[in-house]
Image: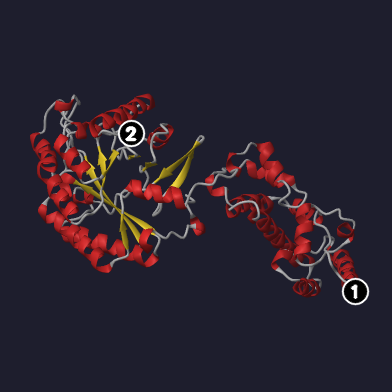
């Protein structure tokens, strides 16, 4: 759930385009459930038949006819539209559908379209055993290469299982996979030793909603939604926009009219880079390569405590307790890990937190003079010039330290990297007059801030 967060890359697409548009045409006709294909039932998904249900053991002539329309008429209507406008297209091609459509494959290749794999068959995978799905992925890649003349660079199952993304990444054969819907930009997924590029897809800027509820009623509905999406992404800049299409759906004349309006709008407004998904993958790999770092959520307890046990001064017990939380990718950033550590500090008893406060050194005190501070404290105090005080300044700090500890029984604590020497002294002189309860709460907040700054040096 973390994604790029506030660290989204500043993307400048080729030609200075503000939006990269990926037109995806799903070619499924001939790969759907059918008794003719050896399946146990007819297809029931994504057609103009309202409330369609699978017919076990029977052919569904109307369903077959609608899928036939996609191959016989819809594909060619779309092929004419895109080639006349010289627009690059990515095909999500079901391997068995491609095998049954040699003329369409020839036309795709002649147009230099990017033909990715859409699995072996256009069927549901959610209940498929892992070993069966793994075998079908391998067979889809083999058959695709046989039919198309080269293996697919990308993959999208669609009707996937919880294992699909992992299994396709594990093949090591794909430049990109798209079985996610979780971002407006590509991102990298670490699959063992492999850095797998993910190019998220869409189910909302998608003509499949002509066959679902709530969905599109007219082509104008679809076209206006695409226009609004493009305009919003154009205003943001540096985003990607996937448009999902199906031959048997958008290939109908009334539906196609909305897509044409969208394409006309983009042509008039400008600022778009129409690209195949493989072109986007090449761009991303070159300009935004993956950089691995050691993730806190993947560390064993000993390593975690060794790395982060000093984030709260001399208090490794906080890291030990935090390791036992539900740590995940959301905690692999400075903000995320700080939240986990701070939770354990806040949940501790007053006596335990007081111990953390007392573990902090005096500012410009005897430990600093004797060079006995932790590396973190040494760096922090020097950042505000506390390692280069005049004799008068040192005397002032020592006097304030003594008075503060005598009154509150713990040292004065402040996140020195947020301050200058002058502002530290001003805060010292102002806070020394507070009651101890107020200072305890203030010091605890400062301890958390110090921890946050230390983590920002270590994690993104």
What residue would you read off at disc 1? Answer: 392
Q: Quadrant of residue 39?
A: top left
x and y percentages locating residue 154 in the rendered image: 34, 40
Residue displayed at 37% across by 45% down: 180
x and y percentages locating residue 168 in the rendered image: 39, 34
**Label 2 vs label 1: CA separation?**
74 Å
- 169 or 112: which is nearer to us? 112
In the rendered image, the vertical position of residue 197 relative to residue 411, given as above or below: above
In the rendered image, the vertical position of residue 226 relative to residue 309, given as above or below: below
What residue would you read off at disc 2? Answer: 126
Residue displayed at 30% across by 62% down: 230
Q: Is residue 174 visible?
A: yes
Which label was assigned to residue 74?
none
With 83 as the anchor, is 344 left or right in this view? right
**Which callout, 2 or 1, points to the residue nearer the camera?**
1
Q: Residues within 10 Å of mark 1 (few under 14, many from 20)?
A: few
Q: Is residue 50 visible?
A: no
- 350 or 87: which is nearer to us? 87
With 328 as the anchor, is 449 left or right in this view? right
Q: Residues within 10 Å of mark 2 (few under 14, many from 20)?
A: some
Residue displayed at 14% across by 43% down: 70
SS under mark 2 = loop
x and y percentages locating residue 255 in the rendered image: 15, 54
Q: Quadrant of residue 174?
A: top left
SS under mark 1 = helix
């Amino acid at each position: 759930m973390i994604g790029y967060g506030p660290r989204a890359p500043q993307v400048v697409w080729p030609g200075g385009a503000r939006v990269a548009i990926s037109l995806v045409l799903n070619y499924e006709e001939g790969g759907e459930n059918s008794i003719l294909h050896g399946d146990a039932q007819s297809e029931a998904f994504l057609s103009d038949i309202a409330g369609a249900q699978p017919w076990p053991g029977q052919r569904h002539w109307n369903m077959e006819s609608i899928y036939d329309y996609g191959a016989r008429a819809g594909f060619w209507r779309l092929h004419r539209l895109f080639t006349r406008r010289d627009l690059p297209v990515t095909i999500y091609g079901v391997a068995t559908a491609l095998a049954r459509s040699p003329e369409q494959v020839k036309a795709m290749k002649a147009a230099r379209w990017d033909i990715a794999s859409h699995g072996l068959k256009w069927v549901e995978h959610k209940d498929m055993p892992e070993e069966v799905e793994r075998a079908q992925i391998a067979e889809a890649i083999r058959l695709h290469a046989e039919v198309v003349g080269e293996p697919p660079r990308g993959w999208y199952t669609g009707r996937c299982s919880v294992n699909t993304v992992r299994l396709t990444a594990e093949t090591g054969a794909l430049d990109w996979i798209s079985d996610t819907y979780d971002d407006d930009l590509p991102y990298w997924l670490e699959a063992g030793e492999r850095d797998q590029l993910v190019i998220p897809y869409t189910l909302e800027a998608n003509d499949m909603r002509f066959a679902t509820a709530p969905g599109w009623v007219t082509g104008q509905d679809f076209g206006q939604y695409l226009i609004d999406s493009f305009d919003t992404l154009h205003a943001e800049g540096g985003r990607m926009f996937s448009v999902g299409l199906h031959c048997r759906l958008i290939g109908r004349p009334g539906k196609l009219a909305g897509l044409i309006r969208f394409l006309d709008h983009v042509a008039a407004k400008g600022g778009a880079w129409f690209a195949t998904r493989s072109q986007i993958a090449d761009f991303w790999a070159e300009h935004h390569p993956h950089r691995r770092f050691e993730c806190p959520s993947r560390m064993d307890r000993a390593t975690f405590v060794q790395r982060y046990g000093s984030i709260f001064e001399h208090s490794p017990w906080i890291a030990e307790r935090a390791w036992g939380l539900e740590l995940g990718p959301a905690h692999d950033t400075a903000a995320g890990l700080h939240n986990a550590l701070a939770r354990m500090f806040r949940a501790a008893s007053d006596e335990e937190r007081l111990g953390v406060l007392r573990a902090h050194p005096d500012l410009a005190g005897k430990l600093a003079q004797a060079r006995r501070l932790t590396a973190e404290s040494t760096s922090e105090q020097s950042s505000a010039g506390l390692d280069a005080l005049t004799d008068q300044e040192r005397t002032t700090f020592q006097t304030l330290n003594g008075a503060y500890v005598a009154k509150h029984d713990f040292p004065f604590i402040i996140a020195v990297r947020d301050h200058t020497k002058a502002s530290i002294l001003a805060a010292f002189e102002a806070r020394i007059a507070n009651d101890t309860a107020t200072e305890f709460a203030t010091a605890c907040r400062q301890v958390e801030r110090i921890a946050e700054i230390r983590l920002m040096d270590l994690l993104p």
